Image (tube, rainbow, N blue to C red):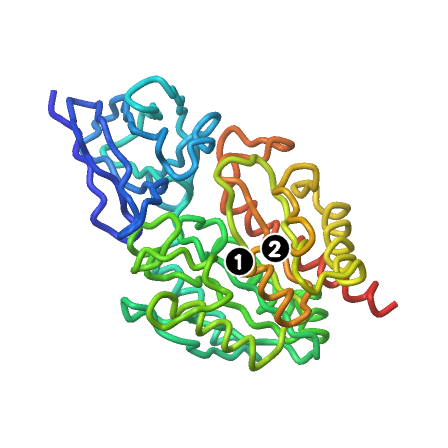
Amino acid sequence: MSNIIIDSRFDSGSIDVMTVHQASAMLRLKHDKDSEFKQWFHFRVANCGGRELVLKIVGLNDSAYPAGWPDYNACVSEDRDFWGRATSTFDKDEEGGTLTIRYTPTGDLVWFAYFAPFSTERHHDLIAECASAEGVSHRKLGETFDGQSIDCLGLGEGETQVWLYGRQHPGESMAEWWMEGALQVLCDPSDTLGRALRQKCRFNIVPNCNPDGSARGHLRTNAKGVNLNREWADPSAERSPEVLAIRNAMDETGVHFAMDVHGDEAIDAVFLAGYEGIPSWSDEHGERFYRYQRILERRCPDFQSAKGYPKSGAGQANLTISTNQVAERYAATAMTLEMPFKDNADYPDELQGWSPDRCKMLARECLGALLEWLESDEG
């Protein structure tokens, strides 16, 4: 029988092919350019012929987040529209840590990815559609090393300055699916939730902070191998023009509420991280974040607060991280939203795991919690 054909020379594609024999292959992750980070993969398999594929990605014990592989099932699509999950198993003792993906496609062609990709073209479609909506403005905050635009959408007539931004880490494509969901609410004149929020807030929305890394198939860095979410204390044109452009724009508007949207490789839950340990911390400032967290947890079954990151001790917050810097710099209620690459263990979905649709539905819940948070503050 003939060999399958594996390639990744397309938007966000990334994999190294080591060996191929008939319907089986041994693969290896690629590093982000000029970086030690590796975790993202996105490739297609051709000449499948309806055979069961056995794909082994090896050497995972030294990936960026090895705890992300146990209980993880690879994302798979035959039409690049619906992304399901392929049965996958991880063996830490095989070939330096091996994820074995098994899947039988119906036809000759199938795509696999670490999470459902959000392509550059889909990004431009999203920006174009929203920018043409009534009351929505677009501005280019800056330009990346690869000459791509940092797109920012503005809308709303209220006084509360809200910044929503995501995909500082490009492999966390769930962040832009969340952004798409949020923009669908906010740009729809028939959506009452969006209308109410536009009356109270001025939204500044950056759906993709790292378009270079996204197109290049990086997990965590920009075109220079820089982790943007460690640049917020002192961004520079030489290392992090993306962060420099966004933070300069924030300086112009001020920030009252900010949400930085991410994904977590290992934790099988949706959670928030706050700004404990910033120099200007006060219980009153912190309570604004905790109140939002409580509202979201009450409203949204997919959200919880039991699992998450450890809180920083007094004065120990890392101010190079966006949420801490924004909370400190602007006295803002800032937070990092994390979604799972795997699934939500509280409400698992065997067919899709955590999925683009659930990202978008979560966005609506987050916006609903924001409106309640604003109204309870007014009361």
123 or 249: nearer the eye?
Answer: 249
Residue under numbered circle 2: 317
Estimate the x, y position of residue 112 in percent, counting from the top left: 33, 37
In the image, residue 205 above or below residue 118: below
Residue displayed at 66% across by 80% down: 157
88 or 283: nearer the eye?
Answer: 283
The Cα atoms of the two marked residues, 2 and 1, are separated by 9 Å
Estimate the x, y position of residue 346 in percent, counting from the top left: 65, 32
Residue displayed at 21% across by 26% down: 25
The amino acid sitting under disc 2 is Ala
Query: Which class describes the residues within 10 Å of circle 2: few (<14), some (14-19), or many (20+)?
Result: many
Estimate the x, y position of residue 368 in percent, counting from the top left: 71, 58
Q: Quadrant of the C terminus?
A: bottom right
- The image quadrant that residue 190 belongs to is bottom right
In the image, residue 40 above or below residue 317: above
Residue under numbered circle 1: 321
Estimate the x, y position of residue 174 in percent, counting from the top left: 48, 49
- The image quadrant that residue 221 belongs to is bottom left
Callout 2 touching callout 1 (CB < 8 Å): yes
In the image, residue 74 above or below residue 233: above
**Residue 372 visible, this angle:** no
